[in-house]
Amino acid sequence: MPNCKVCGKAITSGCVLHTECMEEAALTLAEIICDKYCRWPRESRSAEALEARCDCCEIIKTLLPDL
């Protein structure tokens, strides 16, 4: 039986990551990308302008499709 690559617990399905672990990893990666690499948090003058940019970000749409 395979183990989750994030938390190490056994997985009973064919996937090698728990859904919750994958979601947590995607959120962590999105935070790293936004905080360290995205220029818009530094350049946006308001929260609304930043939110508009984030809503159309293809990287975040790919990592977090349900948001």
Image (cartoon, grey):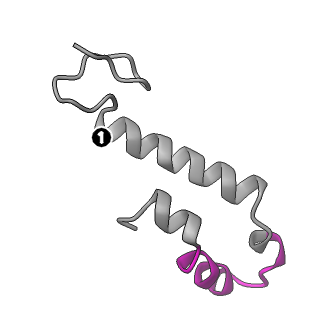
Q: Which residue is drawn at 29% across and 40% down?
A: 19
Q: Residue at x 68, y 54 (%)?
A: 33
Image quadrant holding the C terminus, namely bottom left
Q: Is residue 59 above or below residue 33?
A: below
In the foreground, 55 or 17 = 17
Q: Quadrant location of residue 53?
A: bottom right
Q: In this view, does 25 lie above or below 48?
A: above
Image coordinates of residue 22 in percent, x first then y, are: 39, 40
Considering every residue shown, the one lying at the far right of the view is 43
Q: Quadrant location of residue 45?
A: bottom right
Q: Is residue 67 above or below residue 36?
A: below
Image coordinates of residue 42 in percent, x first then y, are: 82, 71
Image quadrant holding the N terminus, namely top left
40 horizontally vs 15: left or right: right
Mark 1 lies on residue = 19
66 horizontally vs 50: left or right: left
Q: Residue at x 48, y 68 (%)?
A: 61
**43 within the magenta span:** yes
11 horizontally vs 17: left or right: left
In the foreground, 47 or 4 = 4
31 horizontally vs 46: left or right: left
Q: Is residue 24 above or below residue 30?
A: above
Q: What stretch is highlighted in magenta?
A: 42-57
Amino acid type for the residue under numbered disc 1: Thr
- Asked which secondary structure carries label 1, the reply is helix
Q: Is the magenta stretch mostly helix, strand or loop?
A: helix
**14 within the magenta span:** no
Q: Residue at x 21, y 30 (%)?
A: 14
User: Could you classify mark 1 by the number of other residues whose Cα lies within 10 Å: few (under 14), some (14-19), or many (20 or more)?
Assistant: few
